[in-house]
């Protein structure tokens, strides 16, 4: 049977998609073109990983699983216990829905995929808000409580925020049990770090980092386009992305990136 026929059958039957791109540092497929943005890179990764996975599928399927675990084993290397001390595993988690349980499932999946018991740092990017609505402490609190729980259970060592101004960072800092260790600032929105944010971060030992991620890392249409581009006749309109986790594994002593990749979780259904 043609691979695209199998792919169509699998997608029609499944209700959950777990996708791990594997290590992108060594993947020649992605070196053929340099992505112009994080969004383009992710879309390219989803399409490429699905295409590879479908191509490697046996010609006949014994069963149709409800969960598609889309991983290319040769692109994925777990961290060994011997090298763990030498490496820093940093994660940024992009949520598309305000479901705090997504945080735990994303962290568990990252630990399992990378062969570690704890992530060194996790930065949370809350779901994008409707146009004109501002992020508040009320939005952040349930997500932060879930992160704190994962710190207490030693699944995460340090937790950080993304795109908080001085007022909101101060509110979170004062309320939180586990204080934010870092805050990412998008330099597209401000070319220079705001002085009040810089002063507050310095006083309370919060690391200010820069990033270039858009507010929405990948749109629903972008995700569906990536899925449909991976094989003929795939229908992706009723699939929705729940979260995207981007990780980087850095050799501490040399400051070089040993591995980086994405883990993606999506569900089928119209109940948003």
Image (tube, rainbow, N blue to C red):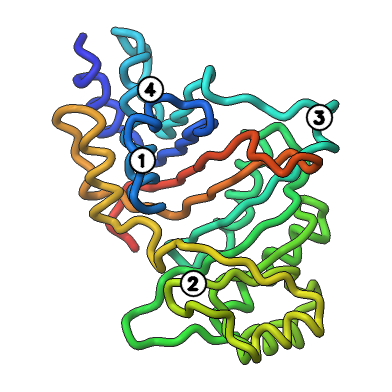
- The residue at the point 63 percent across, 54 percent down is 104
Asked whether, in this view, residue 235 is left or right of residue 154, the answer is left
Quarter of the image where the N terminus is located: top left
- The residue at the point 75 percent across, 51 percent down is 120
Name the residue that disc number 4 marks. Answer: 53
Say which label, 4 or 2, has the lower sequence index: 4
Asked whether, in this view, residue 134 is left or right of residue 193, the answer is left
Disc nearest the viewer among 4 and 3: 3
In the displayed structure, 100 sits above or below 266; it is below
C-alpha distance separating marks 4 and 3 = 29 Å
Judged from the image, the secondary structure of the residue bearing numbered disc 2 is loop
Q: Mark 4 touching mark 3, by CB under 8 A?
A: no
In the displayed structure, 3 sits above or below 174; it is above
Mark 1 closeness class: few <14, some 14–19, many ≥20 residues within 10 Å: few
Judged from the image, the secondary structure of the residue bearing numbered disc 4 is helix
Residue 187's label in the rendered image is 2
Name the foreground residue: 166 vs 239: 166
Quarter of the image where the C terminus is located: bottom left
- The residue at the point 71 percent across, 64 percent down is 159
Say which label, 1 or 3, has the lower sequence index: 1
Asked whether, in this view, residue 269 is left or right of residue 108, the answer is left
Mark 4 closeness class: few <14, some 14–19, many ≥20 residues within 10 Å: some
In the displayed structure, 47 sits above or below 182; it is above
Judged from the image, the secondary structure of the residue bearing numbered disc 1 is loop
Q: Position of residue 55 (x, y in %)?
A: 31, 16
C-alpha distance separating marks 4 and 1 = 22 Å
C-alpha distance separating marks 1 and 3 = 30 Å
Mark 2 closeness class: few <14, some 14–19, many ≥20 residues within 10 Å: some
Judged from the image, the secondary structure of the residue bearing numbered disc 3 is helix
Name the foreground residue: 163 vs 159: 163
Name the residue that disc number 3 marks. Answer: 83
Name the residue that disc number 1 marks. Answer: 34
């Amino acid at each position: 049977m043609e691979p695209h026929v199998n792919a169509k059958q699998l997608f029609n039957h499944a209700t959950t998609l777990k996708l791990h791109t594997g290590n992108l540092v060594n993947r020649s497929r992605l070196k053929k073109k340099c992505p112009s943005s994080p969004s383009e890179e992710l879309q390219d990764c989803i399409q490429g990983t699905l295409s590879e996975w479908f191509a490697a599928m046996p010609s006949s399927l014994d069963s149709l699983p409800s969960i598609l675990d889309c991983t290319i084993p040769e692109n994925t290397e777990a961290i060994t216990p011997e090298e763990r001390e030498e490496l820093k595993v940093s994660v940024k988690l992009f949520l598309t829905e305000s479901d705090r349980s997504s945080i735990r499932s994303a962290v568990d999946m990252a630990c399992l995929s990378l062969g570690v018991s704890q992530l060194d740092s996790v930065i949370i990017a809350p779901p994008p808000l409707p146009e004109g609505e501002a992020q508040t402490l009320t939005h952040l609190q349930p997500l932060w409580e879930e992160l704190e729980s994962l710190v207490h259970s030693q699944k995460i060592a340090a937790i950080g925020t993304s795109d908080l101004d001085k007022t909101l960072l101060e509110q979170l800092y004062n309320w939180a049990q586990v204080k934010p260790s870092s805050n990412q600032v998008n330099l597209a929105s401000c070319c220079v770090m705001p002085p009040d944010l810089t002063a507050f971060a310095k006083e309370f030992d919060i690391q200010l980092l820069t990033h270039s991620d858009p507010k929405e890392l990948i749109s629903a249409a972008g995700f569906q386009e990536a899925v449909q581009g991976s094989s003929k006749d795939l229908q992706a309109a009723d699939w929705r992305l729940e979260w995207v986790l981007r990780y980087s594994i850095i050799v501490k002593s040399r400051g070089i990136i040993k591995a980086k990749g994405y883990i993606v979780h999506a569900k089928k259904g119209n109940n948003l």
